[in-house]
Image (spheres, rainbow, N blue to C red):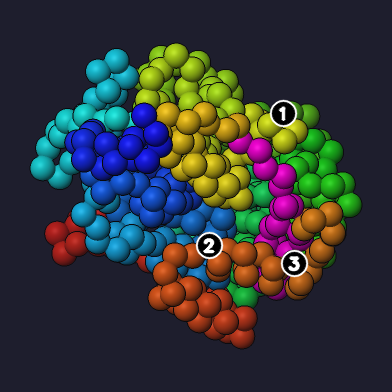
Amino acid sequence: MSYAQQDLLAMTTPCNPIVILGGGFAGTTLLKKLSRRLCRNQELILISEESYSTFNPLLPEVVGASIFPAQVVAPIREMFPPSRNVRFIMGEVETINTTDKTLVCETLKGPHTINYDQLILAVGSRAKLDLIPGMAEFALPLKSVGDAVHIRNMVLRRIARMELETDPILLSSLGHFCIIGGGFSGVEVAGELIDCLRQICHYYPRVNPDHLSVSILQGPDRLLLELPEALGHATADSLRRRGVKILLNTRAVEINSDCVTLADGSTLHAATVISTIGTATNKLIESLGLPINRGRLVTEMDFSVKGTDGLWALGDCAQVINSHDNEVCPPTAQFAVRQAAQLARNLLAHNKGKPTQPFAYRSQGAMAAIGHKKGIALVLGIHLSGLAAWLLWRAYYLLLMPTLGRKVRIFVEWTWGMFFRADITHLRFNRSTDNNPR
């Protein structure tokens, strides 16, 4: 049978849908790529617990009040025009039967069973909160919009309380924000936070700026191990000039409500500890009983899961080997988008009985925004820092924003923030019947 005859048969033969789990960079990009090229009788379903996609690299800007939380999310239904064969379901998948190719999804209506032809896992990862004693009880993770808003509110509450305190030891603890981890998230949060604190002091005249401080605890001997050493040092220099205390070769061994105990036995007084380290396997991935390495589902180079027909995985939840350098793909937006494009091609080839191709991609570099008008970047081997890197970082993520409306909104928000102080609104969403507002 020729490929043309196979295509004609596929167009007239009913089949179960292709189901994508996860509404992040990987899942939404894959849906976008597939929806343009699938045959008319092939249904495509995206299932996500949330109705929106979160741009996680922008979460530190929410913490630092550079942008509002609404600017880092995009409604999934807005990202894809209504279509006969593309469907979005807001729900949580509870069980997957890879033998019968069925899954059970808890929706607003109740449990819903879906038979699938191909299932793609793009569910990401979750915060790991058991790395350090006391982390789960007292540290604040940064993995979601809710986490970012909570940290932002906590910062504002600490400063508001400082206006009412007179005890110098308590003031020092309340005003100290300790960040565990000196990777991308850690340095971005530190930069945003120190700039935010300096700006909003204007609104809290009874708070002594000397009582406000930000620290980074980093186990290795430098920041940003993913980047060349020179950029790691440039990042440290930029943060130190603005008052961030960087403690290298330093590990936390216990976290309490008002302090952090270090490996050398010393103590840091800090009422607010932000954790940017550690990722745990998504619970749904764990339930499959398939090989997992370092919290990620092991896949073949073409994203298929060995020995499991019709199952694929990509993004943060998958350990995919990059055939370009035989290294595990990093959990970044850049790789998630590229993986989605390749997996779309592989799924289309699989449907036609053609061979799939291994993922191969050469990284174009990496970037980080480390505060107001400050950034670092490695692009095509070129080192950038300062304003140029910051503008490049913003331009890249502006391009990734879906729809023109979203791009305009965040561009206006960013432009406003370049000339005016950070917003100090304490975002509390309380119903009239709430007795214990937070």
Q: Residue 355: give x, y in percent of width and height.
A: 52, 29
Q: Kindly indicate whether the residue at mark 3 contacts the one at mark 2 (C-beta within 8 angstroms).
A: no
Circle 1 crowding by C-alpha within 10 Å: few under 14, some 14–19, many from 20: few
Task: Using the image as rendered, state which of residue 159 and residue 195 is in the foreground.
Answer: 195
Q: Can you tell which of label 1 and label 3 is closer to the viewer? A: 1
Q: Residue 320: give x, y in percent of width and height.
A: 59, 30
Q: CA distance from mark 1 to mark 3?
A: 29 Å
Q: Is residue 42 above or below residue 302?
A: below
Mark count = 3
Q: Which residue is mark 2?
A: 400
110 left or right, relative to 265: left
Q: Kindly indicate whether the residue at mark 3 contacts the one at mark 1 (C-beta within 8 angstroms).
A: no
Q: Residue 109: give x, y in percent of width and height.
A: 10, 42
Q: Residue 214: give x, y in percent of width and height.
A: 68, 56
Q: Amino acid at mark 2?
A: Leu
Examine the image and state in which quarter residue 399 appears.
Answer: bottom right
Task: Using the image as rendered, state which of residue 217 and residue 261 is in the foreground.
Answer: 217
- Quarter placement of the C terminus: bottom left
Please tell me whether residue 362 belongs to the stretch shown in magenta. Answer: yes
Instruction: Residue 389: give its label.
Output: 3
